[in-house]
Image (cartoon, rainbow, N blue to C red):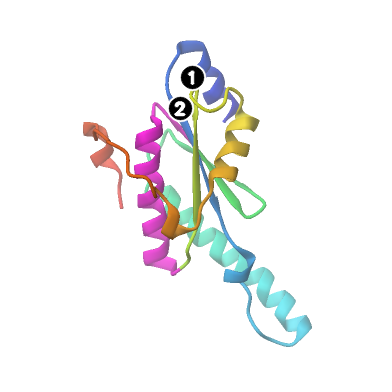
């Protein structure tokens, strides 16, 4: 991921970062304490693996996915801020459709909002909004040809 930010900076190319937050409350299961903890850990892994599978199936091979705490961080080379919003919304919809989980989605872009990988991730996490607030202010977006290639 650091390499992609460095490449974008070096060659003056766009790049976007998407952060997808998973709320712990979406994973909770009501059981006696000990069983609850074991089941919670297993359910957490199951849910995170399911989300990772959906994300992997819906992005291009050259894009990168990482898990940090309960947050998925995606690095999307050659994706503008407007395209990142569209991709984030499609990923959010795919996860909701398949796993019935509402993700909070935020994006950040290079060089418009941040210049380093850490600040891009921080900004994307800060911008993460509940599903009903994603793209609350519609933007004029011209969809590039290759955006239709995203598999959902």
Q: Position of residue 139 (x, y in %)?
A: 32, 39
| Residue located 48% across and 66% down the image | 101
Q: Is residue 15 visible?
A: yes
97 relative to 123, above or below = below
Q: Is residue 96 above or below residue 76?
A: below
Which quadrant would residue 3 be assigned to in this image? Answer: top right
Quarter of the view holding residue 1: top right
Which disc is residue 15 wearing? 2
The residue that appears at 31% across and 53% down in the rendered structure is 152
2 and 1 marks in contact (CB < 8 Å): yes
Q: Nearest the camera: 143 or 46? A: 143
Q: Which residue is mark 1?
A: 8
Magenta stretch? Answer: 75-100
Q: Nearer the viewer, residue 135 or 21?
A: 135
The mark that comes first in sequence, 2 or 1, is 1
Residue located 63% across and 75% down the image: 28
Q: Main secondary structure of the magenta part?
A: helix
**Residue ranking furthest to the front:** 137
Task: Residue 53: give x, y in percent of width and height.
Answer: 46, 55
């Amino acid at each position: 991921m650091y390499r992609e930010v460095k490449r974008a900076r070096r060659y003056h190319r766009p790049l976007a970062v998407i952060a997808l937050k998973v709320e712990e409350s979406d994973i909770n299961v009501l059981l006696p304490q000990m069983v609850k903890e074991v089941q919670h850990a297993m359910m957490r892994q199951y849910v995170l693996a399911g989300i990772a599978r959906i994300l992997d199936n819906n992005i291009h091979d050259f894009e990168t996915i990482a898990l940090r705490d309960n947050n998925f961080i995606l690095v999307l080379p050659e994706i503008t801020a407007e395209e990142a919003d569209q991709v984030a919304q499609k990923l959010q919809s795919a996860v909701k459709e398949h796993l019935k989980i509402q993700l909070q989605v935020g994006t950040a872009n290079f060089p418009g909002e941040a210049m380093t990988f850490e600040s891009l991730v921080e900004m994307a996490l800060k911008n993460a909004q509940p599903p009903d607030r994603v793209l609350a202010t519609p933007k004029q977006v011209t969809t590039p040809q290759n955006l239709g290639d995203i598999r959902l």
